[in-house]
Image: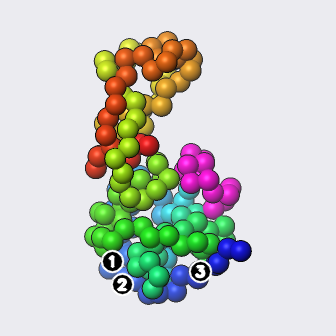
Amino acid sequence: MTQTVTITDEMPDEWVADVVAAVERRGWTVQDAHESAIIVQLGTRETAVLDADSGSVLVIGWTEQHGIDWGLSSDAGATVNEAQSMTEEAAPEAIAAAVDRLMLAGRPDAHLVQHAMPATAASAACTCETVQPCGGIITDAECPDHGARRAPQMWWHWEGPTCALA
């Protein structure tokens, strides 16, 4: 049985505003923010990455159990099933970085995870999706540079502070 945690711990207004600004600077849409929760909109890709139900939102809040935590909500942030720890750092930029990792990799904390990177520059015909500033890609099976082959010209890259691709 899933325990429902209602986020009611009050967060300082100034801190909430700073976190909202940091999250929005990274390109995410904040739907609502107040002393109880910060509600971040999920797009189609983020919904899939987080294995969320359609219409769900990401909720950032404080609870006694986790401190700064996150969860998914299907009722506009009123309740969160299975609140999880987001980060031990309370700095707004640290929260925004954790939101990036959640939205792009499905987890808030940085891990040393390897992923494929092109060893040479892709041509203009490349149709692979560039996911991160580090250049990590998800190969497209139909791509004339990388498709229909087993990781051509690829090498391994350790995830770092500018790369949340897993």
Q: At numbered mark 3, what does the secondary structure look like: helix, strand or loop?
A: strand
Q: Residues within 10 Å of mark 3 (few under 14, many from 20)?
A: some
For residue 27, side relative to residue 94 (left or right): right
Residue 92, quarter of the rendered image: bottom left
Read off the magenta span. Answer: 44-56
Answer few, some or many: residues within 10 Å of disc 1's Cα (few below 14, many 20 plus, some between 14 and 19): some
What secondary structure is found at the residue carrying circle 2?
A: loop
Question: SS class of the residue under badge 1?
Answer: helix
The structure residue drawn at horizontal position 38% and vertical position 58%, both measured from the top left corner, is 109
> What's under tag 3, amino acid-wise?
Val
* 149 vs 77: above or below: above
Q: Which of 34/129 is in front?
A: 129
Residues under numbered marks 1 and 3 in contact, where contact means CB atoms less than 8 Å apart: no
* Residue on which disc 3 sits: 5
Q: Is residue 49 above or below residue 119?
A: below
Residue bearing mark 1: 15
Marks 2 and 3, how far apart in space? 20 Å
The coloring applied to the image is: rainbow
Which amino acid is tagged 2? Pro
Residue 45 visible to an observer of this rendering: yes
Image quadrant containing the C terminus: top left
Give the residue displayed 40% in from the left and 35% down from the top.
Answer: 115
Disc number for residue 12:
2
Which of label 1 and label 3 is nearer to you?
3
User: Where is residue 34 drawn, in percent x and y?
Assistant: 46, 79
Looking at marks 2 and 3 on the same chain, the residue that comes earlier in the sequence is marked by 3
Write the residue at 33% across / 71% down. Answer: 88
